[in-house]
Image (cartoon, rainbow, N blue to C red):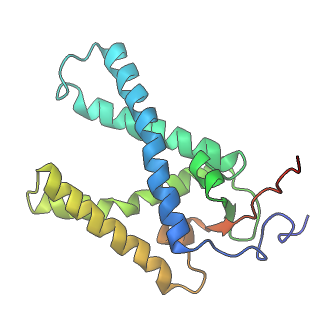
Amino acid sequence: MTPAAQGGPALPAPGLRRRMAAFVYEGVLLFGVLMVTGLVYGLATQQRHAMVGLHGLQAFVFVVLGLYFTWFWSHGGQTIAMKTWHIRLLTEDGRPVGAARAWLRYLLSWLWFMPALVWAWLNGLHSGLQLGVALLVGVVAYAALARCNRHRQFLHDLLARTRLVQTPPPPRRQP
């Protein structure tokens, strides 16, 4: 099968607004995933206070998020939010993404947040508002970097050798 038939070079990169809308929608969906994850962790460890076992919870959440994203990306190339916004993840040559590359992309995708979190930590920012502003500025700056390369891909996609493509919506059924 040619790369174009698999959604390769013939499919354009989705616009930045579409990708950011999928990003926000993904956050809404992940709220439920994280609530269940926290409940499972709390019940399994008999956690009674949020600060007890905090690092264990953070590690558990990190792994659960990794499993969520890598499973969807390596099984069809789309999370639920990506399906909604008609975005698919492929390798840079247009093939489906395997599990190892999906994990690499997941790890690299933390580049969305790490500079802002490190900056906040180095400057002693602790309030929710301060962290929120730092993350918002960091996410906007990171998203703007996609305009700096001719393929309009995010930095973690360039490093993981993956790319986001816009897929056509499914045909509507006639009644």
Residue 130 drawn at (x, y percent): 14, 58
Residue at screen point 45% across, 37% down: 63
Identify whether 40 is placed above or below 132.
above
149 on left or right of 164: left
Q: Residue furthest right?
A: 1
50 on left or right of 151: left
Residue 21 drawn at (x, y percent): 49, 61
Residue 29 drawn at (x, y percent): 48, 42
Identify whether 50 is placed above or below 101.
above
Quadrant containing the N terminus is bottom right
101 on left or right of 9: left
Q: Nearer the viewer, residue 160 or 164?
A: 164
Q: Quadrant location of residue 51?
A: top left
Q: How many marks?
A: 0
Residue at screen point 25% across, 17% down: 47
Q: Residue furthest left?
A: 124
Residue at screen point 46% across, 34% down: 33
7 on left or right of 67: right
Q: Quadrant location of residue 93?
A: bottom right
Residue 159 drawn at (x, y percent): 53, 69
Residue at screen point 41% across, 78% down: 144
Q: Quadrant location of residue 95?
A: bottom right
Q: Nearer the viewer, residue 97 or 79?
A: 79
